[in-house]
Amino acid sequence: MRAITVRVPAKVNLQLAVGPLREDGYHDLVNVFHAVSLFDEVTAAEPGDLGDPGRPIKVTVRGESAAEVPADDGNLAVRAAQALARSAGRSYRADLVIDKAIPVAGGMAGGSADAAAALVACNELWGLGLPVEDLMEIAADIGSDVPFALLGGTAVGTGRGERLTPLETAGVFHWVFALADGGLSTPRVYGECDRLREARGIGAPQPTVSESLLAALREGDAKELGRALCNDLQPAALSLRPSLARTLEVGLELGALGAIVSGSGPTCAFLAESQAHAADLAAALANDPACSALSREAGLSRSVVTAFGPVPGAVSG
Ligand code: ATP
């Protein structure tokens, strides 16, 4: 039985600038994506039997948070494989297995990552040989964050976030992520962002990329990068999950160079000076009485993990 396994990274947004709500219901964004070494694996295999002819693409999800992920056509990996088969004009079959390590609904684009991995795996399994540019187009139709999961590295996304320009970076950045129990729905966080802006009478400016962030990335300057991290969705995520404010504060008190809610949250990202500093920071955060008390009360920080970036996008191997 042939099987192709693809490893795909999570992302953290180094900058997420949210513009006004567009007529199509999306916001114009400037989104600086950064792929980090927290990976899901997606395996696509030829089905062993004829199976259910009505369901040519099937999925099994494994891992701690598997129960939170749909195992039917609502799974983004299945939708990606179906879109790829449609674009090839044939009814291909595949059994997909997702080994999930990226937090679900954590603001780290795990579902989009699985969709990107399924595109790469099925492209190879079915012998389609589509170039990455074609996969990028299919990816953009599935979701705004899917093209970046194919590309990896560090990139700025404009439009809905799907028009990508890779960014030059120097060195490696070390991160700590405080994962939270219970996700935040991305549409709900955007809705709260609009509500807060309206209630406070804040008009949304056209989003622009932060020059200090670009300079910090070019120079590999972690201190500057820590200062430049910014996320326009953070006030909305904190409004929906107030306990996250304390998590961010604790990380900064413990010496993080920067602390930010990742995307729509609730995962919190902390930038460290080095790998050793990231390990110390992760241990301190996990042991911090405020964090563990909060985690007991509010189901907050289920676990703390370290990772580094940038790393490549979805690759088979
Ligand atoms: P983003 O950062 O792109 O806003 P997220 O990290 O907050 O996304 P995901 O983990 O991508 O959120 O998933 C959001 C929802 O999508 C989940 O609650 C789940 O119901 C659904 N979903 C569909 N397919 C998947 C998948 N393969 N993995 C995870 N969630 C999936």
Image (cartoon, helix red, strand yellow):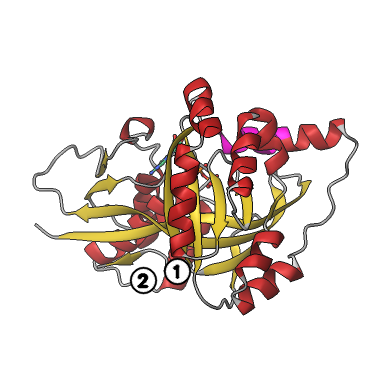
**Residue under the point 39% across and 74% down:** 131
Determine which quarter of the picture holds residue 3: bottom left
Give the answer, above or below, for where 107 lies relative to 65: below
**Secondary structure mostly seen in the magenta stretch:** helix
**Residue under the point 14% across and 48% down:** 47
Residue type, mark 1 in image:
Asp
Please state the extent of the stretch shown in magenta in the rendering.
Answer: 183-192
Give the answer, above or below, for where 183 lies relative to 277: above
Instruction: Residue 38 in the image: state x and y as whole percent.
Output: 39, 55
Tell me how far mark 1 sits from mark 2, CA to CA.
Answer: 6 Å
Instruction: Residue 220 in the image: state x and y as whole percent.
Output: 59, 75
Q: How many marks?
A: 2
Determine which quarter of the picture holds residue 276: bottom left
Screen quadrant of the N terminus: bottom left
Q: Circle 2 sits on which residue?
A: 130
Mark 1 burial class by Cα count in 10 Å: few <14, some 14-19, many 20+: few
Screen quadrant of the C terminus: bottom left
- Of residues 203 and 257, the one drawn nearer to the viewer in this rendering: 257
Report helix, strand or loop for mark 1: helix
**Residue under the point 18% across and 37% down:** 52
Q: Circle 1 sits on which residue?
A: 134
Does the stretch in magenta take in 186? yes
Instruction: Residue 195 in the image: state x and y as whole percent.
Output: 78, 32
Instruction: Residue 127 in the image: state x and y as whole percent.
Output: 24, 68
Q: Is residue 273 visible?
A: yes
Give the answer, above or below, for where 74 lies relative to 271: above
